[in-house]
Image (spheres, grey):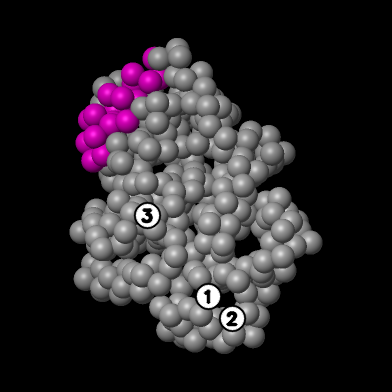
Amino acid sequence: MRHVAITAVGAQMGGARRHLTGFVPALAALPDWTFEIFCAPEAPQWVGTVPRNVRLTPVTSPGLGAIGRVWWDQVALGQLLAQRQPDLLVSLLNFGPARCAVPQINFQRNPLYYCDHHLRSSGSAERMIAILRRWLCILAMRNSARVVTPTAGMWEMIKRYVPELPDDRSVVLPHAVDPPGITASSTVVRLPDGAPRPWLLYPSHAAPHKGFEVLLRTARALRESGTRFALLLTIEDQDWPAGVRAIRERIASWNLQDCVFVIGRLAQAEMIALYPKVDLIVFPSLCESFGFPILEAMAGGRPVVAAGTAVNREVGGAGASYYAAEDALDAANVIRAVLQDADASARAQRYFAGFDWSWARYARDFGALLQAVVK
């Protein structure tokens, strides 16, 4: 029986938490392997079912923010590996040791360190932090037997900055997506009274790279063309205080209060339950490594209109419709066309059904990856 150490101390919220919640139970399908997962102290409370071949080891934060994380990756983790002596290390969240006594598999899932749009639009301090973090990621990738990304588009972003990484080190392992009903919630999400149909939903937290500026210009273009609609935003002030304040001010200054509604952050189960109630999912994000909402929407037969980035097109394929990524008028035209397309919902559902997005498939592919590295 082979033993694998997995470092996931940064999986505390968002997509990282969502991935770990499904990933841990899925490891039960690999009984010939044992796993020790170094995780955040609170992770055992929400990670769900822990299989017999998995041990969660909470790691107390060393403090000092980014410095503490570097200490964990480069020093403390190495000390634990010397004690545990695993056959393999899996660094699940971008960073990992620059030197490792055992073979390492490095997962790269944060596109912000490699996304040209994000880096151009960031302030100088934020851009410098991203560059330093990218450098740490590069050190880990150079010391890894395999580099795993959820899309080929993410690997191409990385290669622009690290062209010397050989392509045979790359493994594309698409995320798993729960089918409709598995995480459905009985909670009723209260929508604004009198919100006109059709309902458009952008299921995202607020962040600079999420495309809200283009989305609001799209809403204004739809409004000016005489289109009735309600755009629902699942954001809160605490997501990005300055940005959400600017979004609210823009809604007010453009008199969009009767068609753009901020409904607040939703739990993942609440979001899944909301999808079937809306008419269309809009996904203007400009910087993603995967894009869960595209597939979650299509799983329930909801049509999707997304920014035409390489990653969005790779994930949504023929099941979604796309517009020129920063062109609000094109976005408005595509949304109107999809709303009038009687086959849009069925096309989305057919596309989702054409690929195995299950955690069982994910576990099989992950097991094959482990076997390829530990021969």
Magenta-colored segment: predominant secondary structure: helix
Quarter holding the N terminus is bottom right
Please give the residue where the numbered disc 1 appears in the rendered image: 102
Residue 157 drawn in magenta: no
Q: Amino acid at mark 1?
A: Val
Task: Say whether disc 3 or disc 1 marks the residue closer to the N-terminus.
Answer: 1
Q: Are marks 2 and 1 in contact (CB under 8 Å)?
A: yes
The answer to which of marks 2 and 1 sits earlier in the sequence is: 2
Q: Position of residue 303 (x, y in %)?
A: 46, 26
Name the residue nearer the viewer: 350 or 211.
350
In the rendered image, which residue does mark 2 sit on?
81
Label 2 amino acid? Leu
Question: Residue 291 location, x and y as percent?
Answer: 44, 44
- Residue 267 appears anywhere in the view: no
User: Crowdedness of circle 1 by 10 Å Cα count: few (<14), some, many (20+)?
Assistant: some
Q: Residue at x 61, y 53 (%)?
A: 367
In the rendered image, which quarter is residue 139 located in?
Answer: bottom left
Please report the bounds of the magenta region as a residue range: 322-340
In front: mark 2 or mark 3? Answer: 3
